Amino acid sequence: MKLKGLALLAPMAGVADRAFRELCLSYGAAGVTSEMVSAKGFTMGDRKSAELLTLSELEHPAAVQIFGSEPKILAKAAKAALSYNSDWIDINMGCPTPKIVRDGGGVALMRDPVLAQDIARAVVSEVKIPVTVKIRTGWDFENINCVEMAKRMEDVGVAALTIHGRTREQMYALPIDYDSIAKVKAAVSIPVIGNGDIVDGPSAAKMIELTNCDAVAVGRGAQGRPWVFQQINAYLNDERIIPNPPLSEIMRVMLSHVEKIIEYKGEYIGIREARKHAAWYVRGIHGAASYRKEIGTLSSMEELMQLVNKVLTNN
């Protein structure tokens, strides 16, 4: 795993698609990961899974992420995913979404470290590229077992770990458990990537300082703010603060982003998937609430351009 820096784009289902990954890399993301894909669905020929795994030539270094609860199926999926030219395979053992957890995948695996280790072992033995794993600190505050999980992953040849500093019970509520991430880093010799509430240079530096982690992964902090990687890189390199772009540039980036989504998915699907991204881009500007209401009904690129003109005129 050769990365371009210290701040990666975290995998986000329904968000980190090809258009967004390419955009974040253009702003200096050290690497990206596909949206998570069901190993079972992929191995059964699900067309949507194949689309989610597609990486363009502009998307490197990049990983594809798979999830599930059956070692043989995950190993089979990992081997099949090699055809998508990924630089490494990532296994999701941290997703807290109820649907994923009910099926025994994602963070549910932290309740069964032996099975989690069997899955990692099966995938590592099946592919020749690096395998990484994403975990959380534990299932709940009474079951913080990230150190055990990390050791088990290292023991079977996992190349690196990403750890989100919350339990499944917390979902995305504060606080971030920096101490547990630090304990994981101290317990293993493989690289550890810290994740959780990284929104700018200072928060990235805080994660590294408090945990000694090797890199950080940015998720929600990049939504509607792909330039956050440029800001993090500048701060980590020489403590330089890069301000957010002016509104005109934010709108230009948004339009470019949505155009790329439409290019890849067609206008009907693309503009509907772009609604959430557009809502994130207008966060914090004067009149954002009313703009978000309009964004929620967008049905064409032309309507989005009209909205942008309104935003720029009123601000």
Image (tube, rainbow, N blue to C red):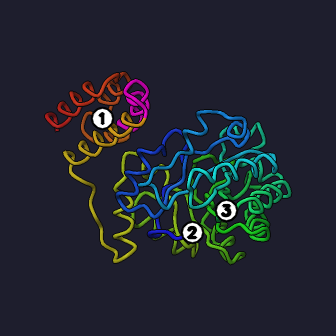
Residue at 52 percent of width and 60 percent of height: 217
Crowd tier of the residue under label 3, counting other residues whose Cα lies within 10 Å: few below 14, some 14–19, many 20 or above: many
Number of marks drawn: 3
Q: Residues within 10 Å of mark 1 (few under 14, many from 20)?
A: some
Q: Main secondary structure of the magenta part?
A: helix
The three-letter amino acid code for the residue at tag 1 is: Ala
Q: First in sequence: mark 1 or mark 2?
A: 2
Question: Whole-percent x and y of residue 253?
Answer: 28, 46
Give the residues drawn in magenta, as a range.
265-279
Q: CA distance from mark 3 to mark 1?
A: 41 Å
Determine the residue positioned at 72% across, 40% down.
43
Between discs 2 and 3, the one toward the N terminus: 2
- Residue under circle 3? 131
Q: Nearer the viewer, residue 170 or 156?
A: 156
Whole-percent x, y for residue 96 in the image: 66, 44
Seen at 63% across and 42% down, the residue is 37
Question: For the residues marked 2 and 3, what is the alpha-carbon distance in whole angstroms?
Answer: 9 Å
State the residue position of label 2.
1
- Which type of secondary structure does the marked residue at label 1 adopt? helix
Q: Quadrant of residue 117?
A: bottom right
Q: Which residue is mark 1?
A: 288
| Rendered position, 35 above or below 146 | above
Q: Nearer the viewer, residue 136 or 268?
A: 268
Tag 2 secondary structure: loop
Magenta stretch: residue 182 in it?
no
Determine the secondary structure under disc 3. strand
User: Which residue is at a point 28% across and 64% down the rendered structure image?
Assistant: 242
The residue carrying pointer 2 sits among few (fewer than 14), some (14 to 19) or many (20 or more) residues within 10 Å by Cα, namely: some
In this view of the protein, which residue sits in the foreground, 2 or 234?
2
Q: What distance separates the C-alpha of mark 1 from that of mark 2?
A: 40 Å
